[in-house]
Image: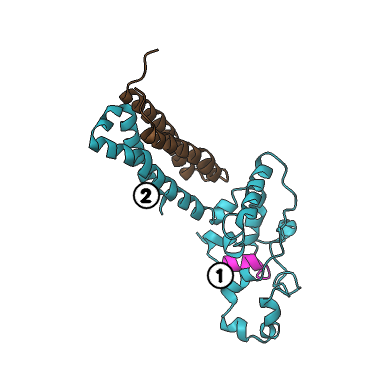
Chain colours: A brown, B cyan
């Protein structure tokens, strides 16, 4: 197996974080225009969770030792 | 914060994140790193905070409370054409803001001042509404607190100096005598009787 270059490692983590954050932001945007008792649950439970996960992936990518 | 502003922040965040996802190589430079930090940390946190505040304020609105099917009769009771009905008289005469009518008199509800226990109850309400079976008729968890009346009426001249209220003021302020269940102002929502009443129709 070919080891990942540092740039590949960071790029992959950025992509994963980005996709999670995009999904979280989309859920949050829909929850804001959805007048429904479940909109707050969707905002916090789904959107908030995805955002949190994305931010954690991004921050851990910044502090992780690079693969070489 | 208006919903439009929150949506604008969300869109800005989306654009930056999509840029970073599509071209992660831009993060090699200093400017790209700052852009990634803005898009993957600062803007999502900002959008989440503003969105939370927006939802928080929206859940005070009368239409939010009435969006649960079980609350519809309580909304209907605000239009009863009888001044003896305390919530209706307050709602129709703007003694409470119409768009936050429920929250004005039920400030201890779920997200606000009720603490963790009340938040768990809020989740239970969602469970009962969508998965379980709501209890009929619904009831307050605790007796109605005079505080809800006093946060407007306390200090009002007609209330403080009126012979009836001033004679029992200590009992009212100490919750020893309930405003709504001691036989004084006991016509509240009375949803069981709504089919037999006349209704006020506001002028458009």
Which residue lies at the image location 59% right of the left edge and 48% below the top edge? Answer: B67
- Horizontally, is A3 left or right of B116 in the view? left
- Horizontally, is A1 left or right of B175 in the view? left
Which residue lies at the image location 68% right of the left edge and 81% below the top edge? Answer: B170
Quarter of the image that includes the C terminus of chain A: top left
Mark 2–mark 1 distance (CA, rounded to whole Å): 31 Å
The image quadrant that residue B129 belongs to is: top right
> For the view shown, which residue lies furthest in the top direction?
A1
The image quadrant that residue A5 belongs to is: top left
Which residue lies at the image location 71% right of the left edge and 82% below the top edge? Answer: B168
In which chain is the residue bearing label 1? B
Q: Nearer the viewer, residue A42 or B163?
A: A42
Q: Classify B69 as above or below A8.
A: below
Disc with the residue nearer the chain's start (2 vs 1) = 2
Label 2–label 1 contact, CB within 8 A = no
The residue that label 2 is drawn on is B5
Kindly state the secondary structure of the residue where label 1 is placed: loop
- State the extent of the magenta-drawn residues as a range: B81-92
């Amino acid at each position: 197996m070919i080891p990942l270059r540092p740039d590949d490692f960071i790029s992959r983590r950025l992509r994963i974080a980005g996709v999670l954050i995009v999904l979280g932001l989309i859920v949050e945007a829909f929850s804001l225009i959805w007048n429904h008792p479940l909109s707050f649950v969707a905002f916090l439970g789904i959107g908030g969770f995805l955002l949190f996960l994305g931010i954690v992936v991004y921050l851990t990518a910044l502090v992780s030792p690079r693969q070489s | 914060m208006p919903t439009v502003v929150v949506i604008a922040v969300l869109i800005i965040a989306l654009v930056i994140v999509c840029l970073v996802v599509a071209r992660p190589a831009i993060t090699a430079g200093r400017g790209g790193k700052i852009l990634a930090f803005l898009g993957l940390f600062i803007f999502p946190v900002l959008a989440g905070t503003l969105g939370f505040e927006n939802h928080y304020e929206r859940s005070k609105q009368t239409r939010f409370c009435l969006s649960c099917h079980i609350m519809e009769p309580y909304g209907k009771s605000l239009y009863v054409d009888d001044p003896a009905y305390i919530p209706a008289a307050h709602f129709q005469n703007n003694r409470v803001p119409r768009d936050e009518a429920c929250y004005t008199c039920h400030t201890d509800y779920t997200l606000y001042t009720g603490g963790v226990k009340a938040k768990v109850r809020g989740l239970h309400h969602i469970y009962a509404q969508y998965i379980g079976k709501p209890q009929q008729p619904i009831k307050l968890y605790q007796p109605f607190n005079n505080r809800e009346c006093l946060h407007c009426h306390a200090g009002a001249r007609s209330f403080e100096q009126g012979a009836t209220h001033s004679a029992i003021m200590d009992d009212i302020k100490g919750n020893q005598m309930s405003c709504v269940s001691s036989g004084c102002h006991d016509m509240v929502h009375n949803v069981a009787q709504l089919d037999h009443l006349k209704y006020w129709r506001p002028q458009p």
